[in-house]
Amino acid sequence: MSKHHQTAKELLQALGGSSNIANYTHCMTRLRVTPVNHNRIDEASIKQVKGVVGVVDDDTYQIILGPGVVTKVAEQFGIVLQEDSAAPSQEEASPEDLTSKGADMKSELKKKNNTPFKNFLRKVGSIFIPLIPAFVGAGLIAGIASILANSITAGDLDKDTWQQYVTILNVIKNAIFSYLVIYVGINAAKEFGATPALGGVIGGITLLTGVTEEFPIMNIFTDQPLTAGQGGVIGVLIAVWLLSFLEKFLRRFIPDAIDIIVTPTIALLTVGLLTIFFIMPFAGLISSNLIGGIDWTLERGGIFAGFVLGVAFLPLVMLGLHQVLIPIHIEMINTAGMTILLPILAMSGAGQVGATLALWVRCRKNKSLVTIIKGALPVGILGIGEPLIYGVILPLGRPFITACIGGGIGGAVIGMFGNVGSIAIGPSGLALIPLIAHGLWLKYIVGLLAGYAGGFICTYLFGIPKEAITEGSNNKEVPETKAKTEVAPTAEIEGTNYTISESAFILPFDGYVMPLEDVPDAVFSSKMMGDGFAIEPTNNTLVSPINGEVVSIFPTKHAIGLKTDEGLEILIHVGIETVALKGQGFTCLVEDGQKIKQGTPLLKLELDYIKENAKSIITPVIFTNSPKETKVELNKTGYFNQGTNNIFTF
């Protein structure tokens, strides 16, 4: 079982099982679930699942997992959801459950943030969320094509050689952008409760396929020919919204026997005519004025407008409302060839990167926080900000505010330059550079640097919580890390003092650290063999956690005994019931009696084989000759890299 499958399984259980899942989807960082009954969600358990950065309880229940991970977990979530649905039901819904469901749904609608307008905005955002991977990929491809085309125009590249590659890249890019209204129509129909195929047709109508200059369709308000795509996605959203009402109305009266023939025909004809003669002209008017208003604000607001937009965007991301801006970006690209809004909003990400760097500098003794920062910062620099928001700056409070200010500073710089736009929608941060229009990428970089600097300085001076400076900021009080030259507490073992300093033991695997009580084996979890901790490894090489020697290697190679130079004996038992593998999947790299240093490779594992054939890969680390009164206190739990120290104290 893969770790992503296990994560999905634990999430489904904490969400109340398959019977409590009405729908689910995912974006680049979040698994978004529509529950049947919010009361059945065990949020505390969800937050304990390995890999979960945070949650947002909104119109959909959003579980923050981070880029890359969420795609794999979502895939496995679908598998375990299907398995759970197919399994015999352990319990049936009682009248109390149904009553609770109704009360829960009613109470959710009364939430402060669930105004009709905000719900509509979230729904619009949900229409575009499934399209974001396509926007990102096609947008970056468009950026590459643009760079090549500019180089051809400038004479730096030979046209006969390179133009064909530009054409090929544009074909790939156009597969999403040229037919975007069809994708939007399908997704909008799903959200508004219409038939998805009909929504796609309504979107396709706005392309005016078959209309020529000789036989145009006239705008009844201006007596000018309609243009393909007029009104864009805004018109499609309006049309599909009307389609959903008409479909529901028709099905109240049309008999089931002829519904499949009559309803689609009447719905398409009615809404199609409305789209061509009313919605497209009306939506075109809205689009042009909306884009014009934004342009006017940025042209005249300049620095001030850029600052306000840069400050405001992070809270929108935190609430999951930032996706509603996608239609505006798309319309700006359709009308002007670029969106000047996206580079300004991208500065909010620069502000939080700067804030995170300041936290890293000021809180370097807080190793748990630094570990989280190391994992989240690279993707943050590339424009995926949710791991930094939910894993670092938002839980600490003040850094979130100073990060917003840093974003405002970067936005002000972009606003001062003016006319810095993106030719397509993509991630912010450094990843947006290839998409910057008209070769103004240097101005965009200056804005990024201003955002980094603003976030760093504001956070360094005003945004560092005192409790975050040392270990213990992440909901657990741990004594401040001692200098390596100091003597740490000692454990009495058979009359001898064995000193365990913070650097005397390092983590032997990459993996998830957990209490010994969580090991799925009574012998270990009851501490019959001694106290210690456990780790679920994620890499294939076990290294020595200590300086000392190898004192025993089990014949099946699944367990190895070590002893420190001071005499503390350690048993590392790789997996549970792995003795049954008879050595298969294990390669020993040392010999009995061999002197070893921290980091010396001990065992090579075929991790996938062991996972498939053993009860568990969870590995207990036991201090076998420690006295009964000695208790191991974990300083850290969760995922850590091989070589991490200060894992525990006696």
Image (spheres, helix red, strand yellow):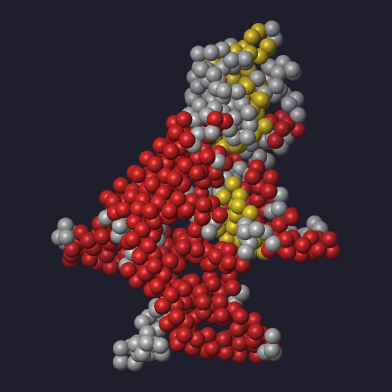
> Would residue 10 be found to the left or right of residue 173 on screen?
right
Residue 535, by quadrant, is top right
Q: Which is more toward the observer, 496 or 213? A: 213
* Image location (x, y in percent) of residue 599: 49, 25
Q: Is residue 197 above or below residue 124?
A: below
Q: Which residue is drawn at 55% across and 41% down?
A: 397
Residue reaching furthest right?
95
- Residue 530, given in percent of the width and then of the height, sits at 71, 22
Q: Can residue 187 be seen in this view?
A: yes
Question: Which residue is farthest bottom?
Answer: 215
x, y percent for residue 524: 71, 30
- Total marks drawn? 0
Q: Measuring 60% from the left and 54% from the top, which residue is drawn there?
A: 62
Query: 332 and 64: which one is in front?
Result: 332
Asked if one can make out residue 85 in the rendered structure from this viewpoint, the answer is no
Seen from the viewer's position, the closer of residues 1 and 605 is: 1
